[in-house]
Amino acid sequence: MACPYMGGGLTHRVTFMEGDEECQQGVNKVEMGFGQTYGEYLQLDKILTAQKLKSEADGQRVDDEHLFIVIHQAHELWFKQIIFDLDIVRKLLNNTIVDETKTLKIVSGLDRIVKILSLLTEQITLLDTMSPLDFVDFRKYLTPASGFQSLQFRILENKLGVKQERRIKYNAQHYKNVFCDGDLKALNQTEDEKSLLTLIESWLERTPGLKSTSGDEGFWDKYEKSVKRYLSDLAKQAEDPSNSEDIAKQLLAEYHKTSDAFQSILDPRQHEQHIRNGMGVRPRRKKR
Protein backbone atom coordinates (compact mmCIF):
# COMPACT_ATOMS: atom_id res chain seq x y z
CA MET A 1 0.00 0.00 0.00
CA ALA A 2 1.47 3.33 -1.02
CA CYS A 3 1.79 5.94 1.71
CA PRO A 4 1.61 9.52 0.31
CA TYR A 5 3.20 11.05 3.37
CA MET A 6 4.42 10.36 6.86
CA GLY A 7 3.36 12.25 9.98
CA GLY A 8 5.10 15.34 11.31
CA GLY A 9 7.00 13.22 13.85
CA LEU A 10 9.32 11.82 11.14
CA THR A 11 11.96 13.84 9.35
CA HIS A 12 11.55 12.50 5.82
CA ARG A 13 8.89 11.41 3.38
CA VAL A 14 8.85 7.86 2.05
CA THR A 15 6.79 5.56 -0.14
CA PHE A 16 6.60 2.00 1.08
CA MET A 17 4.96 -1.34 0.62
CA GLU A 18 3.14 -2.99 3.49
CA GLY A 19 5.60 -5.03 5.55
CA ASP A 20 8.64 -3.09 4.32
CA GLU A 21 10.81 -2.37 7.39
CA GLU A 22 12.58 0.46 5.61
CA CYS A 23 9.42 2.56 5.86
CA GLN A 24 9.77 2.55 9.64
CA GLN A 25 13.12 4.32 9.58
CA GLY A 26 13.16 7.88 10.84
CA VAL A 27 13.58 10.04 13.89
CA ASN A 28 10.95 9.89 16.62
CA LYS A 29 10.73 13.51 17.72
CA VAL A 30 8.34 12.64 20.52
CA GLU A 31 10.99 10.57 22.28
CA MET A 32 13.42 13.45 21.82
CA GLY A 33 10.99 15.77 23.58
CA PHE A 34 10.71 17.95 20.48
CA GLY A 35 7.63 20.20 20.36
CA GLN A 36 4.12 19.09 21.25
CA THR A 37 2.31 15.83 20.74
CA TYR A 38 -1.00 15.56 18.88
CA GLY A 39 -2.99 15.52 22.11
CA GLU A 40 -1.09 18.41 23.63
CA TYR A 41 -1.45 20.61 20.54
CA LEU A 42 -5.21 20.05 20.38
CA GLN A 43 -5.57 20.21 24.18
CA LEU A 44 -7.55 16.99 24.09
CA ASP A 45 -7.26 16.64 27.84
CA LYS A 46 -9.72 19.57 28.08
CA ILE A 47 -11.97 18.70 25.15
CA LEU A 48 -12.38 14.99 25.89
CA THR A 49 -13.09 15.49 29.57
CA ALA A 50 -15.83 18.08 29.01
CA GLN A 51 -18.61 15.50 28.61
CA LYS A 52 -20.09 15.42 32.10
CA LEU A 53 -23.26 13.32 32.22
CA LYS A 54 -25.68 14.79 34.74
CA SER A 55 -27.63 11.54 34.75
CA GLU A 56 -24.50 9.61 35.71
CA ALA A 57 -23.70 12.03 38.52
CA ASP A 58 -27.23 11.41 39.79
CA GLY A 59 -26.62 7.65 39.78
CA GLN A 60 -29.05 7.04 36.88
CA ARG A 61 -26.82 7.13 33.82
CA VAL A 62 -28.57 7.52 30.46
CA ASP A 63 -26.15 6.58 27.67
CA ASP A 64 -27.69 8.88 25.03
CA GLU A 65 -26.91 11.93 27.12
CA HIS A 66 -23.31 11.51 26.01
CA LEU A 67 -24.33 11.78 22.33
CA PHE A 68 -26.49 14.79 23.12
CA ILE A 69 -23.59 16.61 24.75
CA VAL A 70 -21.06 15.76 22.03
CA ILE A 71 -23.37 16.95 19.22
CA HIS A 72 -23.97 20.31 20.87
CA GLN A 73 -20.34 20.81 21.83
CA ALA A 74 -19.37 20.06 18.22
CA HIS A 75 -21.92 22.65 17.08
CA GLU A 76 -20.35 25.27 19.32
CA LEU A 77 -16.87 24.50 17.96
CA TRP A 78 -18.15 24.89 14.40
CA PHE A 79 -19.93 28.11 15.36
CA LYS A 80 -16.58 29.41 16.57
CA GLN A 81 -14.97 28.56 13.22
CA ILE A 82 -17.81 30.22 11.28
CA ILE A 83 -17.51 33.39 13.35
CA PHE A 84 -13.73 33.34 12.86
CA ASP A 85 -14.06 33.11 9.06
CA LEU A 86 -16.96 35.54 8.97
CA ASP A 87 -14.93 38.20 10.78
CA ILE A 88 -12.15 37.83 8.20
CA VAL A 89 -14.61 38.24 5.32
CA ARG A 90 -16.31 41.22 6.97
CA LYS A 91 -12.95 42.92 7.52
CA LEU A 92 -12.05 42.51 3.84
CA LEU A 93 -15.41 43.91 2.74
CA ASN A 94 -15.42 46.79 5.22
CA ASN A 95 -13.47 49.16 2.98
CA THR A 96 -14.47 52.01 0.69
CA ILE A 97 -12.75 50.12 -2.10
CA VAL A 98 -12.65 46.34 -1.83
CA ASP A 99 -9.27 44.97 -2.89
CA GLU A 100 -10.00 42.78 -5.92
CA THR A 101 -6.97 40.64 -5.12
CA LYS A 102 -8.84 39.54 -1.96
CA THR A 103 -11.94 38.38 -3.87
CA LEU A 104 -10.83 34.75 -3.90
CA LYS A 105 -10.25 34.84 -0.14
CA ILE A 106 -13.71 36.34 0.39
CA VAL A 107 -15.42 33.77 -1.83
CA SER A 108 -13.52 30.83 -0.35
CA GLY A 109 -14.31 32.05 3.16
CA LEU A 110 -18.02 32.28 2.41
CA ASP A 111 -17.93 28.91 0.67
CA ARG A 112 -16.36 27.36 3.76
CA ILE A 113 -19.09 28.86 5.95
CA VAL A 114 -21.80 27.43 3.71
CA LYS A 115 -20.17 24.00 3.81
CA ILE A 116 -19.92 24.09 7.60
CA LEU A 117 -23.59 25.06 7.89
CA SER A 118 -24.47 22.14 5.61
CA LEU A 119 -22.38 19.86 7.81
CA LEU A 120 -24.21 21.08 10.91
CA THR A 121 -27.56 20.39 9.26
CA GLU A 122 -26.46 16.82 8.56
CA GLN A 123 -24.91 16.44 12.00
CA ILE A 124 -28.14 17.22 13.82
CA THR A 125 -29.74 14.17 12.16
CA LEU A 126 -27.62 12.04 14.49
CA LEU A 127 -30.16 12.90 17.16
CA ASP A 128 -32.62 10.75 15.21
CA THR A 129 -30.70 7.72 16.49
CA MET A 130 -31.82 8.65 19.98
CA SER A 131 -35.35 7.62 20.87
CA PRO A 132 -37.77 10.17 22.38
CA LEU A 133 -38.02 8.04 25.51
CA ASP A 134 -34.24 8.12 26.00
CA PHE A 135 -34.25 11.90 25.67
CA VAL A 136 -37.02 12.24 28.23
CA ASP A 137 -34.96 10.12 30.63
CA PHE A 138 -32.30 12.83 30.94
CA ARG A 139 -34.25 15.93 29.82
CA LYS A 140 -34.94 16.88 33.43
CA TYR A 141 -31.22 17.43 34.00
CA LEU A 142 -31.06 20.10 31.27
CA THR A 143 -33.56 22.54 32.77
CA PRO A 144 -33.40 25.49 32.22
CA ALA A 145 -30.73 25.01 29.52
CA SER A 146 -31.84 25.54 25.91
CA GLY A 147 -30.26 26.01 22.51
CA PHE A 148 -31.84 29.47 22.49
CA GLN A 149 -29.17 30.37 25.06
CA SER A 150 -26.28 29.74 22.67
CA LEU A 151 -24.29 32.97 22.77
CA GLN A 152 -22.24 32.10 19.69
CA PHE A 153 -25.34 31.34 17.63
CA ARG A 154 -26.84 34.73 18.54
CA ILE A 155 -23.55 36.46 17.73
CA LEU A 156 -23.47 34.62 14.41
CA GLU A 157 -27.02 35.76 13.61
CA ASN A 158 -26.09 39.39 14.29
CA LYS A 159 -22.90 39.22 12.26
CA LEU A 160 -24.80 37.70 9.32
CA GLY A 161 -27.42 40.45 9.48
CA VAL A 162 -30.57 38.98 11.04
CA LYS A 163 -32.98 41.88 11.62
CA GLN A 164 -34.10 42.33 15.21
CA GLU A 165 -37.74 42.66 14.18
CA ARG A 166 -37.52 39.31 12.38
CA ARG A 167 -36.38 37.37 15.43
CA ILE A 168 -38.48 34.67 17.06
CA LYS A 169 -38.96 35.46 20.73
CA TYR A 170 -37.82 32.97 23.36
CA ASN A 171 -40.63 32.35 25.86
CA ALA A 172 -42.29 35.51 24.53
CA GLN A 173 -39.24 37.55 25.62
CA HIS A 174 -36.44 39.39 23.87
CA TYR A 175 -33.63 37.03 22.90
CA LYS A 176 -31.10 38.91 25.05
CA ASN A 177 -33.03 38.39 28.28
CA VAL A 178 -31.36 35.02 28.90
CA PHE A 179 -27.81 36.43 28.88
CA CYS A 180 -25.75 38.00 31.67
CA ASP A 181 -23.82 41.28 31.58
CA GLY A 182 -20.65 39.95 29.95
CA ASP A 183 -22.56 38.17 27.21
CA LEU A 184 -24.84 41.18 26.69
CA LYS A 185 -21.81 43.37 26.05
CA ALA A 186 -20.66 41.00 23.29
CA LEU A 187 -24.15 40.87 21.78
CA ASN A 188 -24.58 44.65 21.84
CA GLN A 189 -21.24 45.06 20.13
CA THR A 190 -22.27 42.76 17.28
CA GLU A 191 -25.50 44.72 16.84
CA ASP A 192 -23.49 47.94 16.43
CA GLU A 193 -21.04 46.42 13.94
CA LYS A 194 -21.71 46.25 10.20
CA SER A 195 -23.18 42.87 9.37
CA LEU A 196 -22.24 40.74 6.37
CA LEU A 197 -25.55 41.68 4.74
CA THR A 198 -24.88 45.41 5.16
CA LEU A 199 -21.32 45.10 3.83
CA ILE A 200 -22.39 43.11 0.77
CA GLU A 201 -25.17 45.62 0.06
CA SER A 202 -22.64 48.46 0.21
CA TRP A 203 -20.26 46.56 -2.04
CA LEU A 204 -22.95 45.88 -4.63
CA GLU A 205 -24.06 49.51 -4.56
CA ARG A 206 -20.57 50.52 -5.68
CA THR A 207 -20.78 48.30 -8.77
CA PRO A 208 -19.76 50.40 -11.82
CA GLY A 209 -22.64 51.35 -14.07
CA LEU A 210 -25.39 51.32 -11.44
CA LYS A 211 -25.53 55.11 -11.35
CA SER A 212 -25.84 57.45 -14.31
CA THR A 213 -23.04 59.92 -14.95
CA SER A 214 -22.91 62.99 -17.18
CA GLY A 215 -26.49 62.50 -18.28
CA ASP A 216 -25.90 58.95 -19.54
CA GLU A 217 -28.34 56.22 -18.64
CA GLY A 218 -27.39 54.23 -15.60
CA PHE A 219 -28.04 50.57 -14.88
CA TRP A 220 -31.57 51.04 -13.51
CA ASP A 221 -32.74 53.08 -16.50
CA LYS A 222 -31.48 50.46 -18.92
CA TYR A 223 -32.84 47.65 -16.77
CA GLU A 224 -36.36 49.14 -16.62
CA LYS A 225 -36.46 49.64 -20.38
CA SER A 226 -35.35 46.05 -20.94
CA VAL A 227 -38.03 44.77 -18.55
CA LYS A 228 -40.73 46.82 -20.27
CA ARG A 229 -39.71 45.44 -23.68
CA TYR A 230 -39.73 41.91 -22.30
CA LEU A 231 -43.18 42.32 -20.72
CA SER A 232 -44.49 43.92 -23.91
CA ASP A 233 -43.37 40.88 -25.89
CA LEU A 234 -45.09 38.56 -23.42
CA ALA A 235 -48.30 40.59 -23.67
CA LYS A 236 -48.24 40.43 -27.47
CA GLN A 237 -47.79 36.65 -27.34
CA ALA A 238 -50.78 36.33 -25.01
CA GLU A 239 -52.94 38.57 -27.21
CA ASP A 240 -52.09 36.79 -30.44
CA PRO A 241 -55.50 36.05 -32.08
CA SER A 242 -54.22 32.73 -33.38
CA ASN A 243 -53.98 31.38 -29.81
CA SER A 244 -56.60 28.97 -28.58
CA GLU A 245 -58.56 30.01 -25.51
CA ASP A 246 -56.57 27.70 -23.21
CA ILE A 247 -53.19 28.83 -24.55
CA ALA A 248 -54.24 32.48 -24.32
CA LYS A 249 -55.18 32.01 -20.63
CA GLN A 250 -51.86 30.30 -19.87
CA LEU A 251 -49.83 32.99 -21.62
CA LEU A 252 -51.80 35.76 -19.93
CA ALA A 253 -51.26 34.13 -16.51
CA GLU A 254 -47.53 33.89 -17.25
CA TYR A 255 -47.48 37.57 -18.24
CA HIS A 256 -49.15 38.70 -14.98
CA LYS A 257 -46.93 36.43 -12.85
CA THR A 258 -43.75 37.74 -14.52
CA SER A 259 -44.97 41.34 -14.30
CA ASP A 260 -45.67 41.00 -10.57
CA ALA A 261 -42.19 39.52 -10.01
CA PHE A 262 -40.49 42.48 -11.70
CA GLN A 263 -42.71 44.99 -9.91
CA SER A 264 -41.41 43.67 -6.60
CA ILE A 265 -38.06 45.10 -7.73
CA LEU A 266 -39.03 48.14 -9.76
CA ASP A 267 -41.94 49.48 -7.70
CA PRO A 268 -40.50 51.24 -4.61
CA ARG A 269 -43.49 50.49 -2.36
CA GLN A 270 -43.60 46.81 -3.23
CA HIS A 271 -39.84 46.55 -2.91
CA GLU A 272 -39.82 48.17 0.54
CA GLN A 273 -42.54 45.79 1.67
CA HIS A 274 -40.42 42.82 0.55
CA ILE A 275 -37.49 44.23 2.51
CA ARG A 276 -39.64 44.55 5.64
CA ASN A 277 -40.78 40.96 5.15
CA GLY A 278 -37.17 39.82 4.90
CA MET A 279 -37.62 38.67 1.30
CA GLY A 280 -35.04 40.77 -0.50
CA VAL A 281 -31.86 42.82 -0.44
CA ARG A 282 -32.07 46.57 -0.50
CA PRO A 283 -30.11 48.00 -3.47
CA ARG A 284 -30.89 51.62 -2.46
CA ARG A 285 -32.29 52.33 -5.87
CA LYS A 286 -33.18 55.77 -7.09
CA LYS A 287 -36.25 57.62 -5.77
CA ARG A 288 -39.19 58.13 -8.11
Image (cartoon, helix red, strand yellow):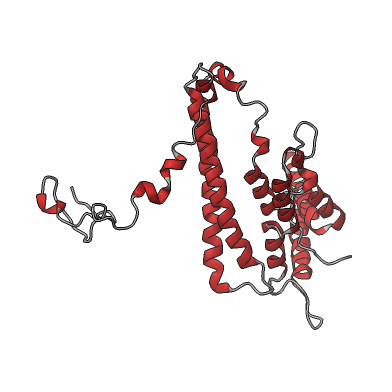
Q: Is residue 154 left or right of residue 44?
A: right
- Image spot of residue 49 (x, y percent): 45, 36
- Image spot of residue 237 (x, y percent): 74, 53
Residue at image x 55%, y 70%?
A: 102
**Residue 111 in view of the camera:** yes
Residue at image x 73%, y 37%?
A: 178
Q: Does residue 188 sit above or below 219 in this rendering?
A: above
Between residues 275 and 230, which one lies in front from this camera angle?
Answer: 275
Specify the quadrant of the image occupied by residue 247.
Answer: top right
Between residues 103 and 174, which one lies in front from this camera angle?
Answer: 174
Q: Is residue 16 left or right of residue 205?
A: left
- Image spot of residue 171 (x, y percent): 77, 31
Q: Is residue 122 left or right of residue 182?
A: left
**Residue 130 in view of the camera:** no
Specify the quadrant of the image occupied by residue 208.
Answer: bottom right
Q: Where's the C terminus, which quadrant? A: bottom right
- Image spot of residue 108 (x, y percent): 51, 60
Residue at image x 50%, y 21%?
A: 56
Specify the quadrant of the image occupied by residue 233.
Answer: bottom right
Residue at image x 69%, y 51%?
A: 186
Q: Does residue 54 sit above or below 22 in this rendering?
A: above
Between residues 134 and 269, which one lies in front from this camera angle?
Answer: 134
